[in-house]
Image (cartoon, rainbow, N blue to C red):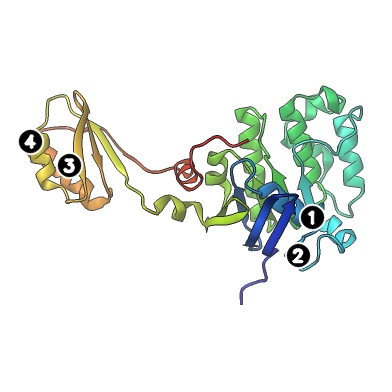
Amino acid sequence: MPLDPVVEVTDLCMRYGETLALDGLTVAVPASTVTAVLGPNGAGKTTALETCEGYRRPQRGSVRVLGLDPGSDARRLRPRVGVMLQSGGVYPAVKAREMLRHVASLHAHPIDVEMLVERLGLGSAGATPYRRLSGGQQQRLSLAMAVVGRPELVFLDEPTAGMDPQARHATWDLVGELRQDGVTVVLSTHFMEEAERLADHVVVVDHGRVIASAPPQDLMAIGARNTLRFSSPAPLDVASLQAELPPTSRVREARPGDYVIEGTVDPQLLATVTTWCAARGVMPEGLAVERRTLEDVFLELTGRDLRA
């Protein structure tokens, strides 16, 4: 029997003056999963997450977190939910290790502070005041503060913003381990590779509504026209190869010696191309299949215009 959603948002509406920030938003987050909430600036995702975190009250609709109201049941939820903010929540003069120890002391069974400090590469910054930490170090400290209490649910807002590649990968590994340990993760990010890599489910929000909700692989497969690329040391008869391909596929010579086949790339198409080449004594070099990324899908759904 399926478990109740850890986060359940139903017909959530929020308005600021003349601006409708959320317009009937409905989302359900299953237990022990990573859900990525994506959207352009002004789409409403921050308002939605802040309502789930208890910082805002719904004007219409309902929000349940771990079966409780995040506003009126905040005291009961606080030990069970971790929240990582992009900024704020830390005294500017406090030292990183001191702040983390303080947060750990508020929980009954915290993660070992020194282990978390070393895991997130904060050892050399442990005695540094928060205001003197780099942006990436501040982000890692905020992440550590969000997970040190062993939460059942954690909200991560742009978790790897400002991080170098090493720190980013360490963060991704930690998020994966949280999921394996049964922790439910809801993250908001503008980094599509991050969502594609981490998320079991992606929710795309725009103009206050959910416009897509599916596993990232399913989103990338919808309407996908894959591309097969290869090179040949000798010129190929494009018309002859085209005659062997399915009607929905097209082959072209992108530049001398480089060939592109656009259409649905499946095992049958690959076999057709390699058989055709073999019959002519041609070795297709650099044979590679390119697929749509989550960023491609995101731009198709939300448009390419800049948002304020």
**Residue corresponding to mark 4:** 280
Of tags 2 and 3, which is closer to the observer? 2
Of tags 4 and 1, which is closer to the observer? 1
Could you say whether the residue bearing mark 4 is in a helix, strand or loop?
A: loop
The tally of labels here is 4
User: Alpha-carbon distance for marks 4 and 3?
Assistant: 10 Å
* x then y, percent, for residue 177: 65, 49
Question: Picture quarter containing residue 197?
Answer: top right
Q: Amino acid at mark 4?
A: Arg
* x then y, percent, for residue 113: 83, 40
Question: Picture quarter containing residue 28?
Answer: bottom right
User: Alpha-carbon distance for marks 4 and 2?
Assistant: 63 Å
**Residue corresponding to mark 1:** 81
First in residue order: circle 2 vs circle 3: 2
User: Alpha-carbon distance for marks 2 and 1?
Assistant: 9 Å
**Residue corresponding to mark 3:** 274
